[in-house]
Amino acid sequence: MSHRARVAAVYLLGFFVDLINMFIANVAYPGIARQFTAPVSALAWVSTGYILGLTLVIPLSRGLAGRFGARRVFILSLTIFMFASLGAASATNLTTLIGWRIVQGLGGGLLIPLGQTLTYALYRSHERARLSAVIMLVGLLAPALSPAIGGIIVDSFSWRWVFVASLPLALLAWVLAFCWLPQTPREPAERFDVKGFALLNGGLALVLWGLTSLGESREWLSGGALLLAGAGLMTMFVRRSQKSTRPLLELTLMKDPLLRTGMLVYQCIPGVFTGVSLIAMLYLQNEHHFSAAQSGGLMLPWSLASFAAISFTGKMFNRIGPRALFIPGCLIQGAGIGLLALLSGFPAQPWLAVAAFTLMGAGSSLCSSTAQSGAFLHVQTQKLADASALWNINRQLSFCLGVTLVSVMLNILQIYAPQSAFRLAFIFAAASVIVPVMLCLRLPGREIVQELNQQSR
């Protein structure tokens, strides 16, 4: 195995562990809700807390890697992650569980940007589309296997065991990182932007808290205030970044239309799917009496469709460009979510649920693999660390916002239209694909294809 293949293998294993912990908890929500008597908005924080922890620590990736070395930080992150997994499994109440999930996210949050930076630096620009296809193909194994395996674990043992299911893989990644990751030279320590870090993380936390509070019937005022405060902090962070010579995040990279559009599509498509998946698991188990294993097993057809979509993207990206892949992907996801709305109007029909998840898998993965392939196309090698941090914050935030927005929407609908809450939630989520379709219409077409053809010569 070549050196760059070994580095890529460690990165992919860390990516896999990250996704397992993002998807495996969904099938455990009904059991957690029964034990802790928790509403949907509170349950959402079991996933949101993990994703928030991931998001908060990513801005530190560039500075920590420069000061201590990427290999050492990667290994330390895995160590923290493994200890926090044991803490989540032993939680005695919902607050403690969410706290450990945040710590778990803080531990695992550096795995992706560090591994991605080390790996992408070893591949040339025209090789990155195929590399991205491999990354997405390996990454889809987690949402394919983890819900089904998690469902079997919940049915056979307890919801607690889903939080330690990834420990063997995390330990393997820890050993391989020791053996295969190269020692990177340390860079002179830069002055860390403490104020920018506080503004960014404070703003993200307040926005998510405010959105969650808006879903509670008696917390509209406090939710709105928190949301406005978070938006204010985020605005201050953007202004500070624009003035700084060495900002915490290099926001000027978003001037690249491919990177910017890829980030926005991630918010609207994979992010929304994460939220839809959460409420779909609750709906299927609570309303249609699916077992945890049956509802988790729906991710298997999702993953088969994802495999086909990602393989198609890897072959066609350089031929037809991102716009011709983005738009069909958005529409296919919308059709899949629309089938869930039909399912909520009839008695349990497993084939309809299978068809819905198949379409969502094809559409979501067509968009996410295209976004991953195109995002770094114009990024220079020396800017990869900055672009990777920006990309991964957006990726994690898309899952955070997707879970929060969809669960809050369901909470509001359960207050005002309880009989049709799930159906309306699925309809609104399906209609949201109009936004990314409009964004993608502005992307160049032939120019990108010509550029890719020239690079491959």
Image: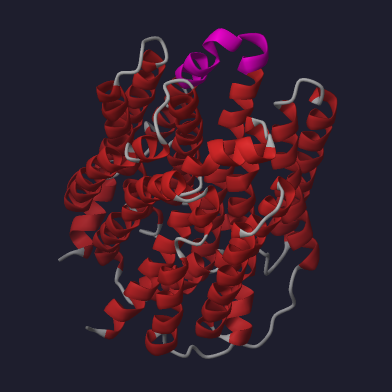
Q: Report whether 245 appears left or right of 148.
A: right
Find residue 253 and report its horizontal and vertical position in percent. Answer: 53, 57
What residue appears at the point 39 percent right and 51 percent down from the top-left corner? 146
* In this view, 355 is above or below 155: above
Residue 231 image offset from top left, x and y in percent:
75, 40
Please provide percent x and percent y for residue 81. 57, 68
Which of the two residues, 108 or 385, is positioned nearer the viewer here?
108
Way the structure is coloured: secondary structure
Note whether residue 384 is visible. yes
192 in relation to 175, above or below: above
Would you say residue 162 sits in the magenta stretch? Answer: no
Which residue occupies 32% across, 40% down?
Answer: 297
Task: In the rendered view, tell whether residue 97 sits above or below residue 213.
Answer: below
User: In the image, what residue occupies the spot 34% across and 36% down?
Assistant: 294
**Quarter residue 351 falls in:** top left
Q: Nearer the viewer, residue 38 or 415?
A: 38
Foreground residue among 66 and 210 = 210
For residue 326, say whether it is visible: no
**The C terminus lies in quadrant:** bottom left
168 left or right of 418 in image: left
Q: Magenta part of the protein: which range?
A: 413-428
